[in-house]
Image (cartoon, helix red, strand yellow):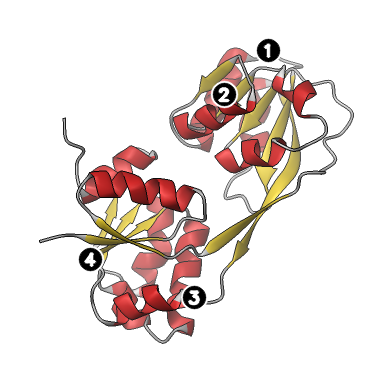
Amino acid sequence: MTVRILVTRPEPDGERTAQNLRTRGCEVVLAPVLRIRHLEEADLGAGPWDAVAMTSANAAHALARHSRRLEVTRLPVMTVGRRTAEAARILGFIEMASANGNEQALAHLIGAHMVRGNKILYLAGEDRAGDLATAVAPHGVRVETVVVYRAIAAVRLPEPAAAAVRAGEVNGVLHFSRRSAVIYLDCARAAGVLDSALKPFHYCLSNAVAEPLVAAGASRVMVAQSPEENALLDLVAPAQS
């Protein structure tokens, strides 16, 4: 039986994830619950900085058309994961290090690479689950946080996705962030399909992402072994060797 998965990621990441799932034999229903707005003229501040930190590929996309892109990409960059590191490489960064984990892992990476008194430019989203500056503070490294993108919440599921959920044609839903999981629930409620939306398997990037789903009544919730996309997709359909 073909597995049909609902992908809630914003574009263009949603389509990239969908393609990965298709190569694993899944059918995909795209239902982005967030829309990314890049703040391409965000005030980065005076600098100078010793390095850059990014916790999302959206930060690299936002920097792509910024007037100070060349100045910033000359610096070393430290990222939360490989996908963000790849986006940074495409943008023009040369010296890169990836934590391959979560924000706490990135804080440890910064502590290992930087010395006390160094200053980091953190290119961030408007809504953040953690506080990188606080996490890095014990290492004596200063973090200047600049918001370069905003994730705007959808108010309801796209009708094709709502119809598939209503008909019980969705086997699983992917959740990459706690906020997007909450918005998924809100959108399903607005479409009048909340009960049906809770019934599929819910594949979550972390325990924090899973919490609102469990609280809402979802009973088939699975959490990736590590906070990376491939580990999440392995819950759905392990990659073929």
Q: Is residue 110 left or right of residue 41?
A: left
- Closer to the camera: disc 3 or disc 4? 4
* Above/below status of 52 relative to 38: above
Name the residue tied to disc 1: 115
Q: Nearer the viewer, residue 173 or 137?
A: 173
Numbered disc in front, either 4 or 1:
4
Earlier in the chain: of badge 4 and badge 2, it is 2
- Which label lies toward us, 1 or 2? 2
Which element type, helix, strand or loop, lies under badge 1? Answer: loop
Query: Tag 1 or tag 4, which sits nearer the N-term?
Result: 1
Q: Which residue is mark 2?
A: 89
Of residues 19 and 33, which is closer to you in this image?
19
Amino acid type, mark 2: Arg
Q: Between residues 40 and 148, which one lies in front from this camera angle? A: 40
Reply above or below: 140 against 2. above
Q: Which residue is label 3 attached to?
A: 186
Q: Earlier in the sequence, mark 1 or mark 2?
A: 2
Q: Earlier in the sequence, mark 2 or mark 3?
A: 2
CA gap between label 1 and label 2 equals 24 Å
Mark 3 secondary-structure assignment: helix
Q: Which residue lies under the disc numbered 4?
A: 171
